[in-house]
Amino acid sequence: MPRPLTVAAAQLGPIARDEPRASAVARMVALMEKAHARGAGLVVFPEAALTAFFPHWWIDDPAELESHFERAMPSKDTAPLFTRARELGVAFHLGYSEIDGDKRFNTAILVGADGMLLSKYRKVHLPGHREHEPWRPFQNLEKRYFDRGDLGWPVVGALAGRVGMCICNDRRWPEVWRILGLQNAELVVLGYNTPQNDPRAPELDHLQDFHNHLSLQAGAYQNGTYVVAAAKAGLEEGCEMIGGSCVVAPTGEILAVSATRGDEVVAADIDFDRCAEIRRNIFNFAEHRQPDLYGPIAAGAPAPRLSAIEMTESEPAGG
Amino acid sequence: MPRPLTVAAAQLGPIARDEPRASAVARMVALMEKAHARGAGLVVFPEAALTAFFPHWWIDDPAELESHFERAMPSKDTAPLFTRARELGVAFHLGYSEIDGDKRFNTAILVGADGMLLSKYRKVHLPGHREHEPWRPFQNLEKRYFDRGDLGWPVVGALAGRVGMCICNDRRWPEVWRILGLQNAELVVLGYNTPQNDPRAPELDHLQDFHNHLSLQAGAYQNGTYVVAAAKAGLEEGCEMIGGSCVVAPTGEILAVSATRGDEVVAADIDFDRCAEIRRNIFNFAEHRQPDLYGPIAAGAPAPRLSAIEMTESEPAGG
């Protein structure tokens, strides 16, 4: 029996450092209306969608840093998004920076068409570095500004399927996809802020879009799940970020992809039942996985990488 | 300091059921000479390269089944390959079916330019089914004819780099790539026999080449390793098999790829030092992996896949 759904990735162009949340929310409402007009029952907004991506610069004033975080969700500023979603009957995914007690998280929520919270995730794989590195054209301070997520990688029954979540850099790690796949995720939603340029490895800059899609396509195929991924894109406060927002099928095929680095909606019709084409056959986990031999993946400290031994410092590319 | 090497994938076209090993070996010697003329220091031959891929048909006569296996390596029939390799100063990878005591394995060896054994691997992820399924146009009886490999996924220092091994269906499982990556593999060599058609999921047939390359490219990128993958290809005893033999860079880029489904050599110049571009940055494991959260991957029995619950039988696509 088909379980159809139309899904949309709502890509955002840059958000200025001084752009009020109300402006970002108004842009998202407009994208939501566009997605709804295309029949979407789910709209996926990017990671940290309410502000400029502030880990790209050094902030030593705690009050200024905290001004980028949310203490309540919904809040006065974000309420219009929740209201419009209820009016349209659209579920949505929203990434934002969250303060909870003395912890700060890079968080995303999945909200049902009735406005109720369906699922929540806090980013685990925080890329970048902890200290100020003035030689860089932009910083990548997620390891400094955020705590590691403490909610695992959740998968919930929602929208007639099983929906899992991760955020940005998480998508590059096959472990994340597998843990979602082992929970029978049929759709994974995520947002990202990925710089076009990696100051540590500029020889890879031309491959950023390819690596984004390669990670999403492999995660989808190897676990038999749909993916909706939404970028914050374009030149934001001196940092150019990739677009490439997309919907990916359980076969790894890209069903829809953005063509700009600005505000843009891409949508595709999916059918959760098509996940079974992969899951019953090539990736039937119960028949074919060999978990008793996978121990090294979950083992404590990894051996230093051969090529890392000579290093004086180390740090990954952004997003 | 660069560590250059020229590597070649030596794809084989079909091997007839009644083709003598000496004929297959002569074809491989010719491919090795072609690869050497292109400067290759390593030639990778396919999985089970000495015979037709017999798991594609039902064999109930034990003597006939065992006639496809090797009891010695090198043997009288395979010695010419070892001899020519030593003469040319070329290392090589060879897949074959191995009997060891009362066990039967789908095996591959890595042999140095001096003819000495550098590494050996026995396939772990055996696809297919155990019983005769007469409705199929061809069988996929690896689970019946082979024991699960018992040598882990080895990585050895060789050819100025670190070389890991896996075989065919192994390449679709990100766990395999990660276990090789955790051992600092800089080059992974493998062979495959992959049917063009999956009788259980014909709607995926047109994606077989894509899925082959997607798996290889993701494994390379996410672990910062080169890959050389060699197919047995073409129409063999009623079963059409994909080609797509290739060399993949640690960036996931395909550097060279075959254009036929027959005997063919593709070669590329690699430099092991380029692995560091990936390993020092985006996939610096020591900095960024979170193994304390990866436990579910190595946990005992996986939960049944949602879509598998309704199934009466289950089985994966070939190779």
Image (cartoon, coloured by chain):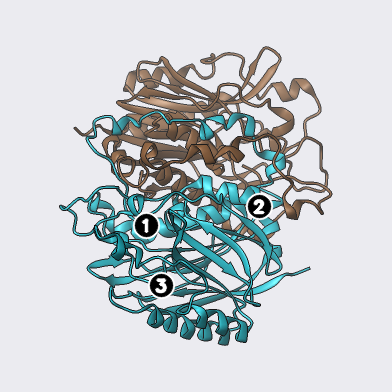
Chain colours: A brown, B cyan
Kind of residue sitting beneath label 2: Asn
Q: Which residue is mark 3?
A: B50
Q: Nearer the viewer, residue A179 or A52?
A: A179
The answer to whether mark 2 and mark 3 are in CB contact below 8 A is no
For the N terminus of chain B, the quadrant is bottom right
Q: Chain of mark 3?
A: B
Badge 3 crowding class, 10 Å Cα cut-off, few under 14, some 14 to 19, many 20 or more, is many
Q: Chain of mark 1?
A: B
Residue in the picture at 42% in, 50% down: B147
Q: CA distance from mark 2 to mark 3?
A: 48 Å
Q: Chain of mark 2?
A: A
Kind of residue sitting beneath label 1: Gly
Q: Which residue is mark 1?
A: B319
Closer to the observer: label 1 or label 3? 3
**Same chain letter for marks 1 and 2:** no
Q: Nearer the viewer, residue B305 or A236?
A: B305
Q: Nearer the viewer, residue B20 or B44?
A: B20
Q: Toward which corner of the image does residue A283 lie, by quadrant?
A: top left
For the C terminus of chain B, the quadrant is bottom left
SS at badge 1: loop
First in sequence: mark 1 or mark 3?
A: 3
In the picture, measured across the screen, residue A170 lies left or right of residue B173, that is: right
Badge 1 crowding class, 10 Å Cα cut-off, few under 14, some 14 to 19, many 20 or more, is many
Kind of residue sitting beneath label 3: Leu
The answer to whether mark 1 and mark 3 are in CB contact below 8 A is no
